[in-house]
Image: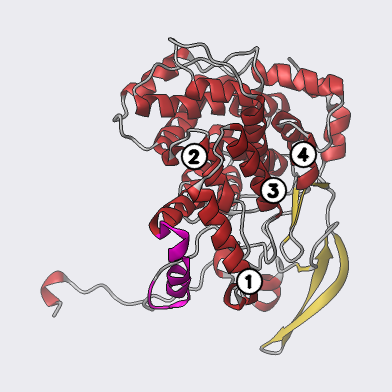
Amino acid sequence: MPLASQNEKVKQMAQSPTSKQVGTATLTFNQKTATLPVLAGTLGSECVDVRKLQSELGMFTFDPSYGATASCESSITYIDGDDGVLLHRGYPIEQLAENSSFLEVAYLLLYGSLPTATALEAFTTGITRHTMLHEQIRRFWDGFRRDAHPMAMLCSVVGAMSAFYPDSIDIHDARQREVSAHRLIAKMPTITAWAHKYNAGQPFMYPRNDLSYAESFLYMFHAVPTETYKPNPVLTKAMDRILILHADHEQNASTSTVRLAGSTGTNPFACVAAGIASLWGPAHGGANEAVLKMLAEIGHKDNIPDFIKQVKDKDSNVKLMGFGHRVYKNYDPRAKIMQKTCYEVLDELGIKNSPTLDLAMELEKIALEDDYFVSRKLYPNVDFYSGIILSAMGFPTTMFTPIFALARTVGWISQWKEMIEDPTYRIGRPRQIYTGAAQRDYVPLDQRG
């Protein structure tokens, strides 16, 4: 269904406005001076444009991990880490998580505005009709070990999708870009659920077009052919909310990976496979699994004081997982929503007394009252509660990161699409400070001492 023609006005609204010059900064070195533009976006800090620094001064900037460098202009997501603000296309995450569905947020990220009822229905129908996988892709799973990590399966299958859908890999064709975006959003629940089914040795369940996006995923994940599956509205809402809260988060490691891969002109399936590989790292997508592991190691509320003491000991290598964030220096706004969702899920499942949740709440209380953590602005982040919720809903810990990837796919593809449609984009090429040996001559093997 050609959404391109229906949404032309929305797409025009979504075009990234360029930043504005608000001043200049002067840098002098070796009796040379460079006057550099200072740019400002809609929100956030001003930024010094250093693109002409090398041509004017013969030098470049040094910023390991790019913590103080803007790599692009984007109109998709804004984060204010000091005040705990997260906006998607200007809308607060709290409002979206409370009122929207995941596919409504997906539309917003892709096209820049909340859809009308007609547009959302058309978009939902389009996504729904792409949920099945090419039948030959099933054979991929036969090549994996039964204990293969689900993220390895996601990397492999998503990367191979260009071989099965070659009609949507021309990045210069707007319609093909849109179709590939829809396919990725639609098929990721199927791929993710099948990865679990393969691990569990259970039959693959095909997507159901009579169910919502979150319902169909839960069905494919939990259902078996021998029993009737009934969607639970509370758990469906929780799943939808988890997907919304993980949909996009500005220029994080995996999103930057997708953009860097995409800057070479490679197809979107390869780009998202690269993003999945980046997300696999425990410092990125595996943090919620680490929270559950930490709580299990603490074991009981009585052990928290000793655990806190070890955290403060620089020589112990014990870390407080689920607290603090690279960007947020305040309470992660997603954590508050996740906490509420946690209570709703446990109540629905009849888990009145959850030792894990009680332990988590006591740990949070102590940490928020301890000057050591408060002074370092180590507040709970989204991972602190998400692992508890997913575990209660029957997801093994190995599936936490794949579910993160499922949600983040819409952010990755939106960021990729924005970059490709930017006429100024070019291949990414970071610089380095070389610290190796200076030039030296080759010494024959028999003359080396």
Separation of residues labelled 3 and 1 (CA atoms): 47 Å
Looking at the picture, does residue 438 appear above or below residue 392? below
Q: Where does residue 315 sit, x and y in percent of width and height? A: 38, 78
Image coordinates of residue 310 in percent, x first then y, are 42, 73
**Relative image position of residue 22 (x, y in whole percent):** 89, 68
Residue 365 in view? yes
Number of the front mark, 3 or 1: 1
Q: State whether the magenta stretch is mostly helix, strand or loop.
A: helix
- Measure the C-alpha gap from mark 4 to mark 2: 22 Å
| Separation of marks 1 and 4 at Cα, in angstroms | 29 Å
Please name whichever residue, 270 or 264, is drawn nearer the observer in this view of the structure. Answer: 270
Q: Earlier in the sequence, mark 4 or mark 3?
A: 4
Dot 1: within a 10 Å radius of its alpha carbon, few (fewer than 14), some, or many (20 or more) residues? few
Q: Secondary structure at mark 2?
A: helix
Mark nearer the viewer, 4 or 3: 4
User: Circle 4 is placed at which residue position?
Assistant: 98
* Residue 391, label in figure: 2
Q: Are marks 4 and 2 in contact (CB under 8 Å)?
A: no
Magenta segment boundaries in residue numbering: 298-316
* Horizontal side, residue 284 vs residue 382: left or right: left
Residue holding disc 1: 369
Q: Residues within 10 Å of mark 4 (few under 14, many from 20)?
A: few
Give the number of the mark in front: 3 or 2: 2
Amino acid of disc 4? Glu
Q: Mark 3, residues whose alpha carbon is within 10 Å: few (<14), some, or many (≥20)?
A: few
Is residue 189 or residue 202 the one in the foreground? 202
Query: Which residue matches tag 3?
Result: 425
Residue type (three-letter) at the residue carrying disc 1: Glu
